[in-house]
Amino acid sequence: MSLGPERIPLDVAASRLRALASGGVGPGLPRKRKDQWILLHAAARSLGEKTLDEKSLNERLKTWLASVGPRVEVDHVTLRRALVDDRFVEREANGASYRRSRAHEDHVVFEEVAMASNPLVGERCVACRPDAPRLSKEEVAKLSSTLPGWKVEEVEAVPRLVRVYKFRDFAEAIAFTNRVGEIAEAEDHHPALLTEWGRVTVSWWTHAIGGLHRNDFIMAAKTDSLLS
């Protein structure tokens, strides 16, 4: 059974590209397939919509690679070939010119995700030290009021922010789980995930402080936004 193309939110792709630029890539392409797609998508967007000859294409790719940063060690020839092989770019019939393509969308789609009304969606997680203060009961109550569907549960005396999402089948549940994993990696803040047939339980709390931090509510809002 085909599950359709992989779907990657543009904000997740942008965050992951920043992580790749910081962590380093190369001299070949990233090892993970999804990271390859994210890199290729960003490179293809830098080319614009005009048809380019091979020399112009190479120059555009060199310029883009330089802008990403020195830790991305992919050479422009490898990048050009991958763009064509994965159909982010098509070579025209004359064999000497190239232009952007949407043919890659049979296996991966980059999509806008509608921003939820909750302003927390637009915030970023901050690094949390073990001595960071936990949220007070009043702060938890105030932030919880902006997140219908979530509830605070205690597990071994540690409060967690928990929500159960329901889906039509296991394929939808696992796809949602993977998307939660993507935003968790992008923000470097990770939940507990329980994936079952037709449902996913997501639990956010901050391990470093053994309780709830504003980061957890930010991530809960971002998790909700994945359904938009």
Image (cartoon, rainbow, N blue to C red):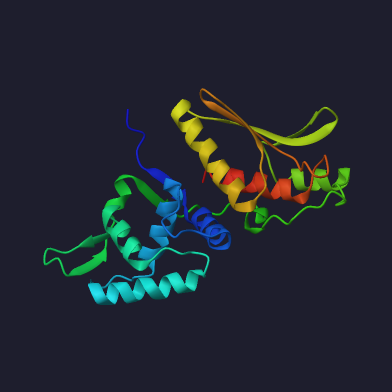
> Is residue 64 in view?
yes
Q: Relative to the observer, which residue lies in front, 210 or 65? A: 65
* Residue at x-position 57% and y-position 42%: 181
Residue 5, quarter of the rendered image:
top left
Instruction: Tell me if 116 is positioned left or right of 145 in this view.
Output: left
Q: Residue at x 73, y 57 (%)?
A: 126
Of all residues shown, which one is farthest toward the front? 27
Which quadrant of the figure contains the N terminus? top left
* Residue 6 x %, y %: 40, 43
**Residue at horizontal 12%, vertical 63%?**
93
| Residue 211 vertical position relative to residue 25 in the rendered view, above or below | above
Q: Is residue 53 visible?
A: no
Question: Which of the two residues, 71 or 34, is positioned nearer the viewer here?
Answer: 71
Judge left or right: residue 133 versus residue 103: right
Estimate the x, y position of residue 187 in percent, counting from the top left.
Answer: 63, 52
184 shown above or below 160? below
Q: As drawn, which residue projects farthest toward the top?
A: 197
The correct choice, above or below, for 199 with respect to 14 in the image is: above
**Position of residue 142 measured from the top left corner of the image (x, y, whole percent):** 80, 47
Instruction: Describe residue 51's horizontal placement relative to residue 192 as left or right.
Output: left
Q: Identify which residue, 140 or 40, lies in the foreground.
A: 40
The residue most toward the left is 94
Return the x and y of residue 176 as percentages of the image width and height: 51, 37
At x 50%, y 29%, the residue is 167
